[in-house]
Image (cartoon, rainbow, N blue to C red):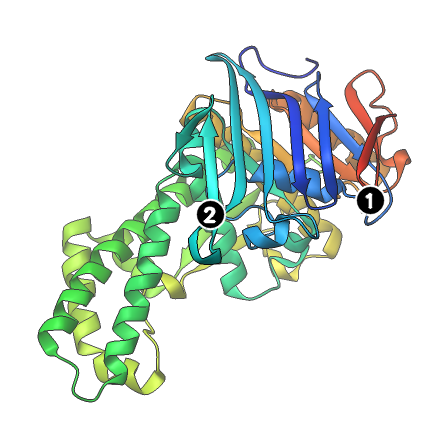
């Protein structure tokens, strides 16, 4: 249990059945740091993806459930034994065939059906970092919004449902605007719902960003290999939410939607709202936009951000989150790798890491569970 805080949720057993490249797997785990080592394509990311299914949403790959079943299989199952301050629990998630060929997601807690993966938040929270995020600061704003919503979701398990409802409301409004004879009363009703959801989503994002920015600033260390970031939101609606009480912001946004119907109909989409928000990130010590920093600096900034987010999740939820880091150390120099492992141990969370080169995890002998991963199989290294 090296590095774990007393009572911190930790996976002690991971069981897979027909998941991705694994026909079957029963993996016991004992330590706070877990390193999965193997060649590209061996199945390392499949393991951390399986764990990510215990968070609300679609997992760290954002894949369809049907794509997770092993080739030729109609179903899959993922089960973990979780040890925590609340005792030992069995959590399970899987895919089962439903009526008319529709696949059904099944969630279970201690053998009983759970309504959705959001129910797992009572027992564990998850944060993760994948190679897909390496270009986050230079990529499109939509990538940063998804990243931001994942940050919020780790704190507020209801956020995902609000975001999904917001997207449905936006689609409904856009469809109505396409109709030249759209019923104004129906548009009013849709925009009323849209305004309520938009302010709720924007407010949750703003609260998380403000809390995380304060967490980053409080832990600033200009000599750290993982420099602190400064965060802010960019968007007309975000300025509205920051300047007005929620009720007034909702009324104002509803009027803006009504006044902008012609413009939005011409554009074919709703131009103003949380779907246009961007997350601005700056390199704290240098006071530079993150997108102008070097690739190495951006990676270090991102790691510092994820570490601070894990601490914030713990502060707000009362439990140290499970941390999943896919190929996190591949482009770090030895000094930064050593500093990262020390920082991960200091978190007090259970941390699962993947890497192709065993040398990436040198120095973790006796501090971590080290597993050698080959296609469909795992052996202790």
State the CA–CA distance, disc 1 to disc 2.
Answer: 28 Å
- Seen in the picture, residue 135 relative to 337 is either above or below; the reply is below
Asked which secondary structure carries label 1, the reply is loop
Q: Secondary structure at mark 2?
A: strand
Q: Within 10 angstroms of label 1, few (less than 14), some, or many (20 or more) residues?
A: some
**Which is nearer the N-term, disc 1 or disc 2?**
1
Q: Position of residue 110 (x, y in %)?
A: 47, 21
Tell me the quarter of the picture where residue 266 sits.
bottom left
Choose top left, top right, bottom left or bottom right for residue 300.
top right
Q: How far across and down, in percent of the image, does residue 28 sit?
A: 71, 20
Q: Is 170 above or below relative to 85?
A: below
Q: 225 and 9: which one is in front?
A: 9
* Horizontal relation, residue 184 to residue 336: left or right: left
Viewer-proximal residue, 29 or 295? 29
For the question of whether residue 325 can be seen, the reply is no
Q: Quadrant of the C terminus?
A: top right
Which numbered marker is on residue 296?
A: none
Can you say whether 193 is above or below 119 in the image?
A: below
The residue that appears at 39% across and 66% down in the rendered structure is 276
Residue 356 lies, in percent from the top left, at 85, 42
* Left or right: 196 in relation to 68: left
Q: Which residue is mark 2?
A: 104
Q: Is residue 276 above or below residue 13?
A: below
Whether residue 261 is visible, yes or no, is yes
Residue at the spot 30% in from the left edge and 75% down from the top edge: 174
Labels 1 & 2 near each other (Cβ < 8 A) = no
Q: Residue furthest front?
A: 100
Q: Nearer the viewer, residue 218 or 263?
A: 263
Q: Which residue is tagged 1?
A: 42
Of tags 1 and 2, the one toward the viewer is: 2
């Amino acid at each position: 249990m090296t590095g774990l805080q007393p009572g911190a949720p930790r996976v002690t057993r991971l069981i897979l059945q027909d998941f991705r490249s694994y026909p079957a797997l029963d993996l016991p785990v004992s330590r706070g740091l877990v390193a999965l080592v193997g060649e590209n394509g061996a199945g390392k990311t499949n393991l951390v993806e399986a764990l990510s299914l215990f968070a609300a949403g679609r997992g760290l790959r954002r894949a369809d459930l049907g794509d997770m079943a092993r080739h030729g299989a109609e179903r899959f199952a993922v089960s973990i034994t979780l040890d925590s301050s609340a005792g030992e629990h069995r959590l399970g998630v899987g895919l089962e065939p439903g009526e008319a060929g529709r696949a059904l997601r099944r969630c279970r807690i201690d053998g009983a059906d759970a309504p959705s993966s959001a129910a797992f938040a009572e027992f564990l929270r998850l944060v993760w970092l994948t190679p897909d995020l390496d270009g986050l600061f230079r990529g499109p704003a939509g990538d940063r919004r998804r990243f931001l919503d994942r940050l919020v979701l780790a704190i507020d398990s209801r956020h995902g449902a609000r975001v999904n409802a917001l997207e449905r409301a936006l689609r409904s409004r856009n469809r109505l605007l396409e109709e030249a004879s759209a019923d104004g009363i129906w548009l009013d009703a849709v925009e009323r719902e849209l305004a309520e959801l938009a302010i709720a989503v924007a407010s949750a994002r703003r609260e998380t960003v403000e809390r995380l920015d304060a967490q980053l600033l409080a832990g600033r260390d200009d000599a750290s290999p993982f420099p602190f970031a400064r965060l802010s939101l960019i968007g007309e609606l975000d300025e509205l939410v920051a300047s007005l009480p929620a009720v007034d912001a909702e009324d104002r946004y509803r009027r803006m939607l009504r006044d902008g119907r012609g413009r939005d109909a011409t554009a074919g989409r709703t131009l103003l709202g949380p779907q246009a928000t961007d997350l601005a990130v700056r390199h704290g010590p240098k006071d530079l936009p993150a997108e102008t920093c070097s690739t190495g600096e951006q990676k270090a900034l991102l790691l510092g951000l994820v570490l601070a987010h894990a601490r914030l999740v713990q502060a707000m939820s009362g439990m140290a989150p499970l941390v999943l880091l896919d190929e996190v150390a591949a482009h770090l120099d030895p000094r930064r790798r050593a500093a990262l492992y020390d920082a991960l141990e200091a978190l007090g969370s259970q941390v699962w890491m993947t890497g192709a080169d065993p040398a990436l995890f040198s120095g973790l002998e006796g501090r971590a569970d080290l597993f050698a991963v080959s296609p469909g199989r795992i052996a202790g290294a």
